[in-house]
């Protein structure tokens, strides 16, 4: 019979496995006392409540440690690349990648999909063949401004050119949450992105020249 564990927050009985409870060696059964869903809900509430304070703290840290962040990236660039390759070669990494591709295809089936090669050339021209986010001149790839998982279409107004690092870092994050926290944040680039993606709304705010 499958062993069950009661979450001390939602009070629900769930399988006592790492699928439902995060691991914690400090507890007798090696699992957190709250289920993953409750932990996730608490985290989201905390982030929403302290959003502005966390952004200011992050900006302060990145400003004070800008050289450290830059040097770390340069120093560990090859190591990070090799680590990523090694992970993809493992069975788990391979299966996760296949699952990711499958889910992506399923989402695209249900969304507007009319982005063309001409649209891509115009996008590159608009951003001067630089990453729309960090401004670096490196190999660029499509990035959904509004993520696929949040209903972002594969259309001209929702695709920007991004370097692999920025694309991976942004992932499924909301642009308005993710971008201000980056050490390469630039208000002018932000404005250019918002104009291109037709996002200059009250939410965006600010004055862009």
Image: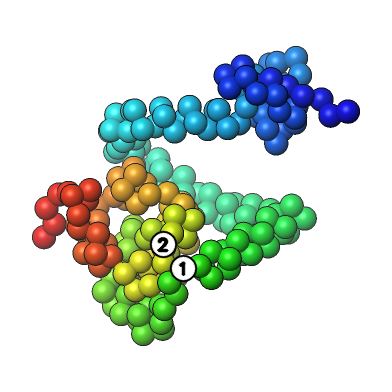
Could you tell me which secondary element the residue under label 2 belongs to? loop
Which quadrant is home to the N terminus? top right
Q: Residue at x 28, y 70 (%)?
A: 127
Residue that label 2 marks: 152
Residue that label 1 marks: 111
Quadrant of the image occupied by residue 9: top right
Where in the figure is residue 203, as x and y percent of width and height? 22, 48
Inspect this view and state whether residue 146 appears: yes
Q: Earlier along the polypeptide chain: callout 2 or callout 1? A: 1
Q: Report whether 111 appears left or right of 127.
A: right
Inspect this view and state whether residue 64 appears: no
Where in the figure is residue 160, as x and y percent of width and height? 36, 67
Q: Report whether 185 appears left or right of 75.
A: left
Q: Report whether 176 appears left or right of 20.
A: left
Specify few, some or many for label 1: CA neighbours under 10 Å numbering under 14, 14-19, or 20 or more.
some
Q: CA distance from mark 2 to mark 1?
A: 8 Å
Q: Residue at x 38, y 58 (%)?
A: 146
Where in the figure is residue 166, as x and y percent of width and height? 42, 56
- 198 up-or-down from 203: above or below: below
């Amino acid at each position: 019979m499958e062993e069950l564990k009661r979450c001390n927050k939602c009070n629900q009985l769930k399988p006592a496995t790492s699928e439902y409870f995060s691991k914690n060696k400090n507890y007798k059964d090696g699992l957190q006392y709250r289920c993953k869903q409750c932990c996730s809900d608490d985290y989201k509430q905390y982030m929403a409540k302290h959003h502005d304070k966390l952004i200011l703290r992050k900006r302060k840290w990145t400003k004070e440690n800008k050289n450290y962040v830059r040097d770390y990236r340069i120093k560990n660039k090859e190591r990070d690349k090799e680590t990523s390759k090694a992970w993809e070669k493992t069975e788990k990494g391979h299966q996760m990648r296949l699952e990711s591709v499958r889910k992506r295809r399923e989402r695209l089936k249900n969304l507007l999909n009319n982005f063309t090669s001409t649209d891509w050339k115009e996008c590159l021209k608009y951003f001067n063949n630089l990453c729309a986010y960090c401004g670096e001149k490196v190999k660029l790839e499509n990035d959904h401004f509004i993520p696929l998982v949040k209903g972002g279409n594969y259309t001209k107004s929702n695709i920007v050119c991004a370097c692999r690092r920025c694309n991976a870092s942004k992932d499924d994050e909301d642009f308005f949450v993710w971008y201000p926290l980056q050490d390469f944040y630039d208000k002018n680039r932000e404005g250019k992105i918002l104009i291109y993606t037709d996002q200059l709304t009250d939410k965006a705010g600010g004055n862009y020249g």
